[in-house]
Image (cartoon, rainbow, N blue to C red):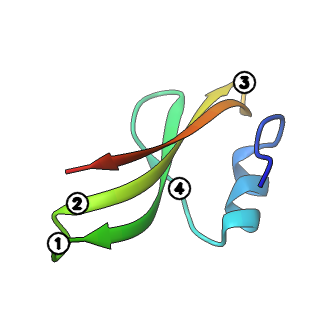
Amino acid sequence: MMLIGKTIEEAEELVGQKTVRMYSSRYAFELKRYCFGLLKRRLHISTCKGIIYDCHFRIDL
């Protein structure tokens, strides 16, 4: 799945979920929950002027 160069709206259509705003230019998709919801696998995306320029997976508490 190539998200770099796309807008937030296009990424939401591709993933099939709404984003969660983390900071002013960073968003995340919550992909999966582990250990009764304590751990969350997320796809973090960074934007500049509404265009995605970076994305990576993380497991957060």
Which amino acid type corresponds to the residue marked 2 in the rendered image?
Answer: Leu
Callout 3 touching callout 1 (CB < 8 Å): no
- Which numbered mark, 3 or 2, is in the foreground of this view? 2
- What number is the disc on residue 35? 1
Left or right of 41: which side holds 60? left
**Quadrant housing residue 16:** bottom right
Say which residue appears at 76% left-offset and 45% top-offset: 3
- Residue 13 in the image: state x and y as whole percent: 75, 66
**Neighbours of disc 2 within 10 Å: few (<14), some (14-19), many (20+):** few
Q: Amino acid at mark 1?
A: Cys
The percent position of residue 15, horizontal first and vertical second, equals 67, 66
- Which of disc 2 and disc 3 is earlier in sequence? 2
Front residue of 49 and 14: 14
- Residue 8 locus on image (x, y percent): 69, 47
Could you tell me how far apart the alpha carbons at marks 3 and 1 are, in whole angstroms?
Answer: 36 Å
Q: Work out how far the residue at label 2 is from the one at label 4, CA to CA, in angstroms.
A: 18 Å
User: Label 2, on which residue?
Assistant: 39
Mark number for residue 19?
4
Q: Contact, CB < 8 Å: mark 2 with mark 1?
A: yes
Determine the secondary structure under disc 3: loop
Q: Write down the residue under mark 3.
A: 49
Q: Residues within 10 Å of mark 1 (few under 14, many from 20)?
A: few
Mark 1 or mark 4, earlier in chain: 4
In which quadrant will I find the N terminus? bottom right
For marks 3 and 1, the one nearer the N-term is 1
Q: CA distance from mark 2 to mark 1?
A: 6 Å
Which of pointers 2 and 4 lies earlier in the amino acid sequence?
Answer: 4
Q: Which numbered disc flags the more N-terminal residue, 3 or 4?
A: 4
Crowd band around label 4 with a 10 angstrom C-alpha radius: few (<14), some (14–19), many (20+) = some
Helix, strand or loop at label 1? It is loop
Depicted 52 relative to depicted 14: above or below = above
Q: CA distance from mark 1 to mark 4?
A: 22 Å
